[in-house]
Image (cartoon, rainbow, N blue to C red):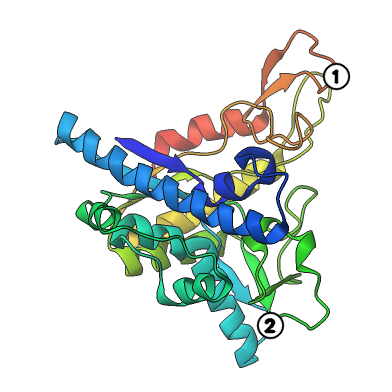
Amino acid sequence: TWVTINEQLIASAASDLHGIHAQSEEESMKNMYQISFNMSIAEKKAMQILKQIDPESKIGPVCSIQIVYPNSCDPKDICASYDAEEMMMYSLLDMSVFGHYPKRYTSYLKERGWLPSVSKEEENLLKSIRPDFIGINYYFPLTVKAPGKDHDFSKLPPFWRSTLFEVTDNPYLEKSEWMPNGMDPMGLYLGIRKLYDRYRLPLIITENGMAYSDRLEDGKIHDSYRIDYLDAHIQKIKQAVEEGYPVFGYCPWSLIDLVSSHQGFGKRYGLIYVDRTDTDEKECARIPKDSYYWYRERIKKGL
């Protein structure tokens, strides 16, 4: 079982990863979408070659899903939530599964001159092969509203930067230091339903976890907050499976503390603590957290 590209949206949009620096904002956005399209072509080629090597293999994309709630029942906010979800979740998965972008997304890019050109050969390749499953990375949902006239979109990450919606706070969700948009197990359950209803493919949870600035206390980490987070999300997966949704695996993020792409060792997801900081390596001692012992027993039970 193989995956193609992990979080294509983020990999293609992060300015410190994709290498686009010395260009105008307009050119940067256009190139960002071209990069993403090139990655989709590469994904299809990888699927094609793997099937030639091993016809029995399974392969699929991994998407950091963005479940999006409307800020209110105002029809404009409802439309904004649809637009946000299509741009940040369905656009690339539609390309992976169907070989084309959604209509609304295509129109949006075309209006701005950002739509990549597609040759006949590329079009045939995109539609020639489909994934066997979809991997889901889920941490938190988003809440959006119809954008205000004075909203500053430039402050948003590129993959949230759209004139179609404005990210807002959700007062119904519990927040944390590294999860300011809120924690929501229901969002994972809804994501499973939405993705299966749209694509009819098996699903696996490839990443799910809680970031926290863990602190050692007498040589131990008492992370009941992480246990609560993981347990609540596993319960929602169990509900989905019991209702018939084909979820064939769950992988917490992560087994061991690792270097966050932007926050170093200050932001930790692991079930095992690594005793070091960004400036002091210490001995890098591995210390199982309370969540490690909890999860060890939890996986013995299954769903």
* Residue 171 horizontal/vertical position (percent): 76, 71
Q: Is residue 261 left or right of residue 215?
A: left
Q: Is residue 114 left or right of residue 267?
A: left
Q: Is residue 257 visible?
A: yes
> Which amino acid, by three-letter code, is at mark 1?
Thr
Q: Is residue 236 above or below residue 8?
A: below
Binning the other alpha carbons within 10 Å of mark 1 as few (below 14), some (14 to 19) or many (20 upward) gives few
Name the residue carrying label 2: 146
> Which amino acid, by three-letter code, is at mark 2?
Ala
User: Mark 1 or mark 2, which is nearer the start of the sequence?
Assistant: 2
Mark 2–mark 1 contact, CB under 8 Å?
no
Name the residue carrying label 1: 279
Element at badge 1? Answer: loop
Binning the other alpha carbons within 10 Å of mark 2 as few (below 14), some (14 to 19) or many (20 upward) gives many
Viewer-proximal residue, 233 or 88? 88
Element at badge 2? Answer: loop
* Residue 202 horizontal/vertical position (percent): 29, 53
Q: Is residue 17 above or below residue 170?
A: above
Viewer-proximal residue, 49 or 206? 49
Instruction: Quadrant for the N terminus, please.
Output: top left
User: Residue drawn 41% across and 68% down?
Assistant: 194
Locate residue 244: give its quadrant: bottom left
* Residue 225 horizontal/vertical position (percent): 71, 45
Viewer-proximal residue, 123 or 129? 123
Locate residue 271: give its quadrant: top right
User: Residue drawn 76% across and 57% down?
Assistant: 180
- For the residues marked 2 and 1, what is the alpha-carbon distance in whole angstroms? 43 Å
Q: Is residue 49 above or below residue 79?
A: above
* Residue 113 horizontal/vertical position (percent): 55, 69
Viewer-proximal residue, 20 or 51? 20
User: Residue drawn 44% across and 58% down?
Assistant: 92
